[in-house]
Amino acid sequence: MQNILPQLLQLPPLLIGLADLAAAFLFLYGLHRMASPVTASSGILVAGIGMAVAVLASFLYAFDVDPAAQPRLMVNITLVFVALGIGGGAAWWSGRKVAMTAMPQMVAIYNGLGGGAAGAIAAIELFGGKAAGMTPFIVTLAGALIGAVSLSGSLIAWAKLDGVIEKPWRFRGQQAVNGLLLLLTLAVGAYLAVVTHGATGDSSVAVPALPTAIYLFFALALALGICMTLPIGGADMPVVISIFNAFTGLAVGLEGFVLKNPALMIAGMVVGAAGMLLTLLMAKAMNRSVANVVFTNFGTIARHKQGNIKGSLKPMQASDAGIAMRYAASVIIVPGYGLAVAQGQGKLYEFVKLLRDGGVSVKFAVHPVAGRMPGQMDVLLAEAGVPYDMIFQLEDINDEFATTDIALVIGANDVVNPAARNDKSSPIFGMPILNADKSKKVFVVKRGEGKGYADIVNTLFYSDNCNMVYGDAQAVLIKMIEAVRGLGLPAVA
Amino acid sequence: MEFQIGISGFIALYIFMVAGFAGWVIIGRVPAILHTPLMSGSNFVHGIVVVGGIYALLNAATLQQQIIGFCAVLFGAGNAAGGYAVTDRMLAMFKSSAHPPVHAKKTNVKSIHTKKH
């Protein structure tokens, strides 16, 4: 009997190891399946199974806890259940309920929570003096810093996307202040590392002796995340969300190293790489470097003299525009963030179906940075029921505008501004744009005469082949639908 | 036999390198149309941090560690559950023309959005 007990104690770590191995594989396989719209929805299920397996197996940690934690084990197990129930339940409920248009801020919150969890794990390691040795200690600090920045930064991103904070908050010397904050944080971290591990690298001084320095470290890191995100404007959010996604992944991966859990390391690093890739893609779609998005105040440098604009704005009635499209042979629709704000995607597809019933060829052209997160427009169109084979990305459809009768620009602005192509002095010069201006006729649905996010006059609006339809996107679409129905034409398709 | 996993410096770097490369390659193949679900899907995947949170909370030896550990599990669970919920919802919406969710018939074009937002 005495020999069986040690054998049995080997069982939980074995099961945990196997479960984590399975989880890591299922994550990779699940993400792999997300590469096509056909298999994507099974991809998240596969990844979800991996998560469930790993979480269930993690309860086996209860069989082998620190002797110091032994007296509190029952309380801790209860706390785990309560935390899982509250955190998981609330997030599940909010995730099921949230409007598709609010998806960017929701993803920002969930991402921030992940960063916060990584930071909290690091805090326990630090306060408990559990990270033994110089390398794990520094890795813990790095994970703590990145996780905390991701938490506070994501919350600011949420506030901006949700409209809680409306204006970017900027002042002179802001970058210097942020740099100073980063240096201070690193200094406190270095102080902690040296004091606890000394020059020899062995942990002679218990870290818990320095709670103030640890609190200071986290406070500085959180402040850094806030100060980094505050000056960044709404339209740059696709880049920012991608960065924080990468940050959280990285923090999780680093804490996985400290906890000696390869599943966390792999999942974290995969997400870190994915976030980094998306960040670069988004920055490329704006023809700006990542550093430029994060460190320059786009709105302020954008205010410069505009060249003389030829032509004038030519307003048009929504009903006339709708009827013109019904009689066109081909229409390409360029949706933008304004469509999301107006919640007009459902009405848009209703209108598109009317056109298609009339034999009009209709396609959607989506710019990579349209909306507030990568691919947001695609999701909104999908929500309205638009089949994904009607939705085309910039490089696939840009040549087709020249042979198209009508381009309908709805709630988009800077992504169709020809200045990006031909005005070297324009701040958006070089950004890939959708060539809506090259189609025979352009209708622009817009709330008013205001400028776009980048605060640049859009020369497209003044060109001869362009008409402006003013109004809220959804209201305009309702008028268009009524006008086309009013024609009473028979369906041909 | 010993099943405890020991990961020393270089092994960790190898794991990070291969995982990072795998992530880069897998994500690089995803078409732009799926970038939002992909982002929230990868967001869900780093919700695995909840496992680390559970480990930390089970090993919490002081009240302070219990409080922080509770937050770690709370946040991690929120990350995982929320990430799954929104990704699943979004992916369920992507349909092709061959299998349209609500296909308009010739005569009765009915609104998808009966509910006003």
Image (cartoon, rainbow, N blue to C red):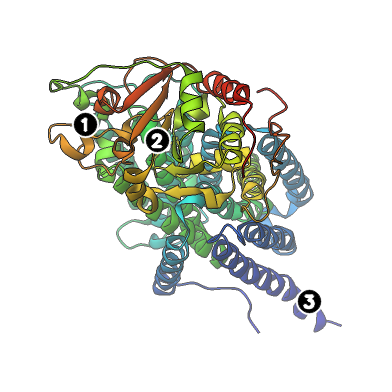
Q: Is residue A35 visible?
A: yes
Residue B114, x across and y down, in percent: 72, 27
Q: Are marks 1 and 2 on the same chain?
A: yes
**Front residue (pair A50, A34):** A34
How far from the left and from the top, in percent, is residue A460? Answer: 28, 28
Query: Disc 1 to disc 2, how far (Cα)?
Result: 45 Å
Name the chain letter of the residue that bears numbered label 3: A
- Alpha-carbon span between mark 3 and mark 2: 70 Å
Regarding mark 1 in the picture, which secondary structure is present there? helix
Q: Residue at x 67, y 73 (%)?
A: A18
Disc 2 marks a residue whose amino acid type is Ala
What residue is shown with label 1?
Answer: A176
Write down the residue under mark 2. A407
The answer to whether tags 3 and 1 share a subunit is: yes
Name the residue furthest right. A1
Q: Is residue A248 visible?
A: no
Tag 1 or tag 3, which sits nearer the N-term? 3
Question: Label 3: which residue?
Answer: A8
Identify the subunit bearing mark 1. A
Q: Is residue A233 above or below residue B97?
A: above
Residue B113 placed where, x, y %?
A: 68, 30
Residue count near mark 1 (Cα–Cα under 10 Å), binned few <14, some 14–19, many ≥20: few
Whether residue B63 sits left or right of residue A441 in the image: it is right
Vertical side of A209 occupied by A457: above or below: above
Residue A74 as seen in the image, left or right of residue B20: right
